[in-house]
Each structure stands twice: as C-alpha cells, then as structure tokens.
Image (tube, coloured by chain):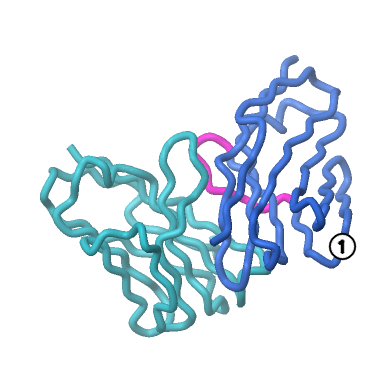
Chain colours: A blue, B cyan
Amino acid sequence: GENVEQHPSTLSVQEGDSAVIKCTYSDSASNYFPWYKQELGKRPQLIIDIRSNVGEKKDQRIAVTLNKTAKHFSLHITETQPEDSAVYFCAASSNYQLIWGAGTKLIIKP
Amino acid sequence: DTGVSQDPRHKITKRGQNVTFRCDPISEHNRLYWYRQTLGQGPEFLTYFQNEAQLEKSRLLSDRFSAERPKGSFSTLEIQRTEQGDSAMYLCASTTQGGDTEAFFGQGTRLTVV
C-alpha cells in the first residue's frame, strides 16, 4: 500500500523567508497530492493540490512541485508571515483513499 | 455553516463504555470518510462510504469500531468497550467523488477515555 513520508517534522523560519516542506510517496499509481494546513484546535483545510499530470502549481505565495520519477513532491511558501504558523500535512491519493504524512510544524519567527 | 458538522465536539467516557459520534457531510457529497488523529500525527484513515455503501475499512480498525451511513447522508461511528488507547480526535470528511478532489473536514470529535 501507499506510504507517505514528510520532512522535516518541525521547521522554524524567520518572517519573510521561504519555507520548504518535502514529501515522498511509494505507490507509483498515486495521482493526486494535496497539502493541508491545520491550525491548533482546528480542522485541516486544503491550501493547494496537484495532480500527476502537472509538474508545478502556484497560488500567490504558495507553490507545489511534483517529481513523479523520484516520487516526491514539495510545498514552497515564500515571504512567510505569522499567520503561516501551523501544522502542514501532505497526502497522496490512489483511487479513493488519501494517505497522509505525519505533518510539519511550521514556526514563523518575528 | 453549510460545511461538514460533527457532534459532539468533545466526549469524555469511562473505559469500557460505548460511544457514538455523528457526522453530517456537505449535502451534495456522496463520499464520506472517517479518520482518527492523535497529537502530532496526520489523520489515520478508518473507513469510507460512497453513498450508503461502506467500501473500505482500515485493517488497523478493531472490531470494536463500526460505522454506518444508512441513508447515504449522515454517518455514525460507534466504539464499543472503549479503551484508553481510543483517546484521539475523530475527524469526518466528505468529497464529491473519488480520492482526487478536495476533502472537506468537520471540526472533529475529541474523545477522552478515562
């Protein structure tokens, strides 16, 4: 079955700098890769997603890249702001099921 | 709020008791998922429904767990003979169709078994 690994588990960056979170997956049949943001005590919410027929997608300060050959995908946040502080989860989907990474706690230092 | 709703938000129960949680998905969504999340971890898949049919159940799921979605709308998750290890956040999510569309999550039910 699918296995998703996410690194780092904690990431601390200076406000205004960029943050990069990386995930690898094992099932080459996976075709959908969403990223969710979860603030403390709140539900996970989708921030960006990418499908296997696309190599990169960008939405304002957030971008995701996908390397199907290497089976890894990354989240890039530029010009980080205090409200970016949260736990970020990657996931990979094959057919009906999302398999989640363990999460990255992003800390934005003022 | 027309999103996914879950009830109750918090549940404290004694070990050995049964508990039942409810999830009301977004009305036009035919797929409904249950996840369990412990502190510092990502959501762990438990089971999912397409309409009223339960199509998959995690191999990790104990026989003490059962879920239903009798009319293809709301769903219930029951845990029988609760154990302390069942303490977690139970999240429900719904989507319009397969695993390649956005999953909308409810606020979750936090279960504490004492």
Q: How many marks?
A: 1
In front here: A56 or A83? A56
Q: Which residue occupies the extreme top position in the image?
A: A110
Crowding at mark 1 (Cα within 10 Å: few <14, some 14-19, many 20+):
few
**What kind of residue is marked 1?**
Val
Chain letter of disc 1 in the image: A
Magenta stretch, main secondary structure class: loop
- Spot occupied by residue B24 in the image (x, y as percentages of width and height): 43, 68
Q: Is residue B96 above or below residue B62?
A: below
- Spot occupied by residue A109 in the image (x, y as percentages of width and height): 72, 16
- Spot occupied by residue A104 in the image (x, y as percentages of width and height): 62, 34
Q: In this view, does B101 lie above or below A85?
A: below
Left or right of B70? Residue B98 is right
Left or right of B75? Residue A81 is right
Magenta part of the chain: A39-47
Q: Which residue is drawn at 72% across and 26% down?
A: A82
Q: Which residue is drawn at 41% across and 66% down?
A: B47
Q: Which residue is drawn at 52% across and 43% down?
A: A42
Quadrant for residue A53, please give it. bottom right
Quadrant for residue A55, please give it. bottom right
Q: SS class of the residue under badge 1?
A: loop
Q: Residue at x 64, y 40 (%)?
A: A6
Q: In this view, does B111 lie above or below B61?
A: above
Residue under pointer 1: A54
- Magenta-colored stretch includes residue A4: no
- Magenta-colored stretch includes residue A46: yes
